Image (cartoon, helix red, strand yellow):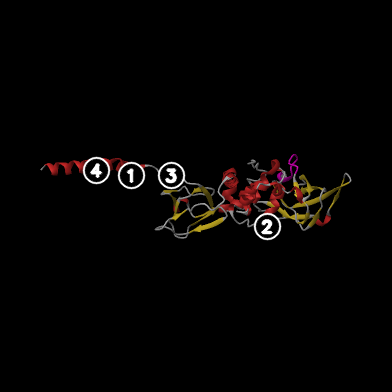
């Protein structure tokens, strides 16, 4: 009998030892899941918000929504889809009703500058919700006419920005706001304190329903030290004027970048463009705008950034 009592006490003791571990396990199941690293954001949504869920919640998936590692996305309606930008990777998700898509661990690099510019892209989505909706749903001429800025201006080249363009033979691309179609675009080269028009670059813009008024001029050899004036004249003879200076490629901000920044800029052409636009209080926004000529601007984030530069959004330095 005595031996049986000893055995019973040993079992009680073992149970007491395991009790804290059981309590810890119970607490872990009750605690909210840990917050993981910011990975990317939603770039495009095809379908009503109720057709998607994020971590079990409906109607919260929208363009510009930030995504963290471990987030679970479901597409609950046939024909609906959502496109994600995860670092430099673009992922499209269709019907996942029975098998949610889990946002993976972010690819390297995932520090410093990448986080800053990724947050900036998300901020740009929120900067002009009207623009985001227009790109998502489309607008007709009458709706657009009610939302445009009637005052003609070229924010990319406005006074005080000291806009810079890297030297070389290349097309010039820029956008403007306001006014009414058709427009005439004239480019003048400053020679010995006088302006001489580069007639080869004179262009007319006639599209009435453009969501972004934009011109891409033909190739021209822009030489270091030259100064140019751009003039846009609308159908009502409103005139907007902007200036820029051509600088040597040795002043390219990338040449002064740290090794870490250079590595991170290789992750995405969109990140490189944002980075350019942030340099020297906006002096390089015109050059950043040129970079859209060489990248895919079909993503909504790229379109919104491009429009933001053309409309004069202020990009904070990092």
Report whether 13 appears left or right of 164: left
Alpha-carbon distance for marks 4 and 1?
17 Å
Closer to us: 283 or 154: 283
Q: Is residue 34 magenta?
A: no
Earlier in the chain: of badge 3 and badge 1, it is 1
Q: Earlier in the sequence, mark 2 or mark 1?
A: 1
- Residue 202, above or below 31: below
| Disc nearest the viewer among 3 and 2 | 3
Query: Cα distance, mark 3 to mark 1?
Result: 15 Å
- Real-space Cα distance between discs 2 and 4? 69 Å
Element carrying mark 2: helix
Q: Position of residue 124 (x, y in %)?
A: 59, 45
User: Is the residue marked by circle 3 packed among few (<14), some (14-19), or many (20+) residues within 10 Å?
Assistant: few
In the picture, the disc for residue 294 is 2
Q: Secondary structure at mark 4?
A: helix
Mark number for residue 34? 3
Q: Are marks 3 and 2 in contact (CB under 8 Å)?
A: no
Does the stretch in magenta take in 161? yes
Residue tagged 1:
25
If you read the primary sequence from the N terminus, does the residue marked by circle 3 or circle 2 appear first?
A: 3
Q: Mark 1 Cα within 10 Å, few/some/many (few <14, many 20+)?
A: few
Q: CA distance from mark 3 to mark 2?
A: 40 Å
Nearer the camera: disc 4 or disc 1: 4
Quick check: 137 left or right of 221? left
User: Closer to the observer: label 3 or label 4?
Assistant: 4
Task: Decide whether the magenta segment is chiefly helix, strand or loop.
Answer: loop
Rendered location of residue 13, percent (x, y): 23, 40
Q: Write down the residue under mark 4.
A: 14
**Between tags 3 and 1, which lies in front?**
1
Looking at the image, tell me whether mark 2 or mark 4 is earlier in sequence order: 4
């Amino acid at each position: 009998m005595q031996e049986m009592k000893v055995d019973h006490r040993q079992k009680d003791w073992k149970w007491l030892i395991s009790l804290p571990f059981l309590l810890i396990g119970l607490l872990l199941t009750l605690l909210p899941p840990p917050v993981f690293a910011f990975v990317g954001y939603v770039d495009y949504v095809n379908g009503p918000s109720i057709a998607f869920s994020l971590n079990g919640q409906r109607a919260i998936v929208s363009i510009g929504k930030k995504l963290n590692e471990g987030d679970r996305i479901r597409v609950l309606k046939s024909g609906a889809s959502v496109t994600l930008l995860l670092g430099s990777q673009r992922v499209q998700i269709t019907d996942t009703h029975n098998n949610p898509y889990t946002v993976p661990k972010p690819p390297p690099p995932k520090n410093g500058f990448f986080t800053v510019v990724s947050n900036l892209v998300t901020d740009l989505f929120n900067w002009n919700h009207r623009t985001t909706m227009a790109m998502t749903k489309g607008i007709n001429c009458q709706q657009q006419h009610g939302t445009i800025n009637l005052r003609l201006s070229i924010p990319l080249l406005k006074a005080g920005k000291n806009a810079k363009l890297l030297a070389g033979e290349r097309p010039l691309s820029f956008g403007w706001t306001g006014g009414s179609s058709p427009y005439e675009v004239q480019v003048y080269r400053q020679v010995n304190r006088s302006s001489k028009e580069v007639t080869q670059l004179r262009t007319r813009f006639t599209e009435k329903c453009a969501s972004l008024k934009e011109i891409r001029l033909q190739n021209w050899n822009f030489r270091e030290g030259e100064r140019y004036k751009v003039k846009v004249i609308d159908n009502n003879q409103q005139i907007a004027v902007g200036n820029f200076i051509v600088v040597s490629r040795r002043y390219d901000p990338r040449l002064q970048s740290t090794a870490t920044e250079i590595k991170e800029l290789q992750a995405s052409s969109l990140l490189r463009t944002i980075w350019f636009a942030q340099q020297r209080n906006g002096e390089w926004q015109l050059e950043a705008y040129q970079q859209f000529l060489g990248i895919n601007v079909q993503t909504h984030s790229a379109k919104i950034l491009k429009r933001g530069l053309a409309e004069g959004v202020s990009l904070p330095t990092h």
